[in-house]
Image: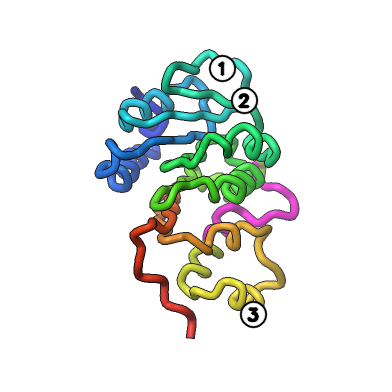
């Protein structure tokens, strides 16, 4: 479909998605993408996951025209927690959530905190275009960058005792982002400009070792 997953500089996005989801193409039931624009990505997901219901979020009411039998469009701001709770979360759980929205720090972080609980067991939450963490015009005063927040999640995942770790090494948690994800996070995979967070599945019978 020529989705921007293949645009110049990020052609590896398609490889990342294939590596993560190719074996689950026929079992994924619900997909949510933040950022619709021309709907190319939504149609790509509908083709890639032929059994899935596809949901998209965008702030532009014009995007309603892209709705179809399998594609559902929700108009609102991704950083609006009330909108997410009322219009989007009840449509879950989602096997795959992709944030390709506004890419500001508050947008990425609020969406992750609010939507992580609706990721299905074994599902994945993807944050694209992390290079915007280094763009001053995408910063939000008082917030860390999304790369910093994700780095803290990685630290917590490896130390396996996030609250104790934070109390020893940080003055306060990073706006709840790490704490909201870590309890049931299984893995975090990084590639250039993209991070895939995978939630523990019901079959994960080996708990992470505790810090000692």
Q: Nearer the viewer, mark 3 or mark 2?
A: 2
The residue at the point 62 percent across, 25 percent down is 75
Query: In the figure, 194 relative to 37: above or below?
Result: below
How many angstroms separate mark 3 from mark 2 (CA)? 42 Å
Is 154 displayed left or right of 23 in the figure? right
Q: Which residue is mark 2?
A: 75
Q: Sequence-wise, which precedes: disc 3 or disc 2?
A: 2
Q: Residue furthest left?
A: 23
- For residue 149: magenta? yes
Residue 189 position by quadrant = bottom left
Q: Nearer the viewer, residue 66 or 103?
A: 66
- What's the magenta region? 138-150
Q: Which residue is mark 1?
A: 64
Is 33 displayed left or right of 105 in the figure? left
Is 77 displayed left or right of 33 in the figure? right
Looking at the rendered structure, the secondary structure element under dot 3 is helix
Q: Residue furthest right?
A: 141
Looking at the rendered structure, the secondary structure element under dot 1 is helix
Q: Sequence-wise, which precedes: disc 2 or disc 1?
A: 1
């Amino acid at each position: 479909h020529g989705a921007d997953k293949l645009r110049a500089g990020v052609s590896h996005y398609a490889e990342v998605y294939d590596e993560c989801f190719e074996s689950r193409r026929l079992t994924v039931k619900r997909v949510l993408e933040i950022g619709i624009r021309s709907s190319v990505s939504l149609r790509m997901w509908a083709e890639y996951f032929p059994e899935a219901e596809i949901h998209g979020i965008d702030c532009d009411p014009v995007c309603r025209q892209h709705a179809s039998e399998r594609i559902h469009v929700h108009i609102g701001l991704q950083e609006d927690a009330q909108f997410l709770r009322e219009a989007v979360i009840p449509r879950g759980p989602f096997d795959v959530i992709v944030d390709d929205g506004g890419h500001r720090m508050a947008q990425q972080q609020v969406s992750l905190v609010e939507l992580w609980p609706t990721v299905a067991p074994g599902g994945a939450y993807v944050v694209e275009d992390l290079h915007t963490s280094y763009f001053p015009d995408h910063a939000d005063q008082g917030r860390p960058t999304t790369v910093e927040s994700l780095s803290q999640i990685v630290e917590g995942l490896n130390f396996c005792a996030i609250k104790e770790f934070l109390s020893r090494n940080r003055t306060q948690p990073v706006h709840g982002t790490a704490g909201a994800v870590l309890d049931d996070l299984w893995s975090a995979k990084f590639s250039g400009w993209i991070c895939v967070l995978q939630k523990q599945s019901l079959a994960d019978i080996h708990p992470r070792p505790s810090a000692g």
